[in-house]
Image: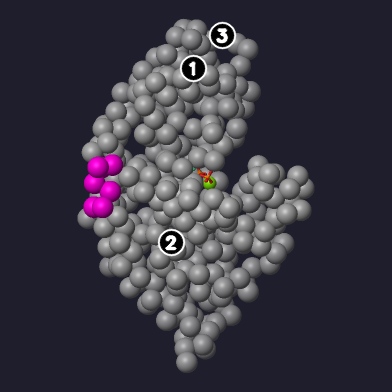
Amino acid sequence: MKKVSLTGDRPTGPLHIGHYFGSLVSRKELENEYESFVMIADVQALTDHFKEPEKVRDNVMEVALDYLAFGLDPQKTTFFIQSKIPQIAELTVFFSNLVTINTLKRNPTVKDEITEKKDLFGAKGEKLTYGFLGYPVSQAADITIVRADVVPVGQDQLPMIELTREIAEKFHRIYKTQIFPLPQAKLSQAPRIMGLDGNAKMSKSLNNAIFLKDSPEEIKEKIKTAKTDSFSTASYDPKKRPEISNLLLIYGLIHSITPQEAAKEMGSVNYTSFKSKLAEDLIKFLEPVREKRKGLEKKSAEVMNILTEGTQKTLARAEETINLVKKAMKIDY
Ligand code: ATP
Ligand code: MG
């Protein structure tokens, strides 16, 4: 039996180059070796976009188009929509007994996100919701409902995978059973691409990303205005010169060289020349994805079909898991 991989994205915007190098590349590698599930996490997106349901709905298709345009293969990967699997919501409720509020409040990724979302959760987090604080529990249910062995993710997700392992172990201990593999995170070659504004993470929600679908003009403009520093030529020093090092990292990734090698290649030209070369190369690099996406955009009914079929397949596996869970919890009346 093949091992299982699960991962996903929130439909809060189209995918960006952080996703490309942070997780899509490793998903493609796993596609052949593992039984692969990829989830569009609409329920999780609603935890901080509950006032914008249209945005979440529209971005389900955006994300699905990006998956296929990037080249994930629907014959090999099962795509599904989180809200269509009610067993995830059930499992979330059962798991919520196994996690303390303090554990969730200490989660470093959740902490950062609460700070970033002041408009929604208040300057001191005084308007923080139960749903947002609890999303890592729901994420543990996403992973365990398909009994995943491996989860290809970016660096920000490591605390979530660790929590999933803790919950699974606690479940096994209390209910004297062994249902879930203890999932391992799989980090890619570039587990964290910074934002073009200097933010620690490129993010759909922070307006600091290059999207896979961006036009050549958009890419040029974004790279041109990307934050650098007061030097005039580049060198790779992520601690002292994070913004320019991030641009070197991106340059290196699209040319399959290390950021140090990128610095050697680009360290003698001024920032303006480096940036225009980077923009040109990025435009070329993303061209096949952009072109394939244009074709797929005309076939949205087919794309929706792929999601529906994947959802059916996932439902069958989720049903198996929830039955095992209910039996172990003695609620299998
Ligand atoms: P949002 O702003 O809505 O949280 P996001 O850009 O963070 O969106 P997610 O859907 O939350 O994207 O993340 C999907 C996957 O992509 C996760 O595995 C995450 O770790 C990875 N990822 C997201 N941003 C980056 C990045 N900048 N570098 C590397 N990996 C990333
Ligand atoms: Mg995120």
First-in-chain label (3 vs 1): 1
Tell me where residue 243 appears, x and y as whole percent. Answer: 57, 24
Relative depth, front residue between 110 and 253: 110
Residue of label 1: 224
Kind of residue indicated by mark 2: Gln
Residue 232 got which mark? 3
Q: Residues under labels 3 and 2: Cα distance? A: 47 Å
Against 256, residue 265 (above or below) is above
- Within 10 Å of disc 2 (Cα), the crowding (few <14, some 14-19, many 20+) is many
First-in-chain label (1 vs 2): 2
Residue numbers of the magenta segment: 296-302
Against 166, residue 252 (above or below) is above
Image quarter hosting the N terminus:
bottom left
| Residue in the picture at 36% in, 34% down | 213
Tell me where residue 92 appears, x and y as whole percent. Answer: 54, 69
| Residue in the picture at 58% in, 27% down | 197
Does residue 298 belong to the magenta stretch? yes
Q: Residue furthest bottom?
A: 333
Contact between marks 3 and 2 (CB within 8 A): the answer is: no
Against 215, residue 125 (above or below) is below
Tell me the quarter of the picture where residue 36 sits: bottom left
Secondary structure at badge 3 equals: loop
Q: Can residue 201 be seen in this view?
A: no
Kind of residue indicated by mark 3: Ser
| Residue in the picture at 63% in, 12% down | 230
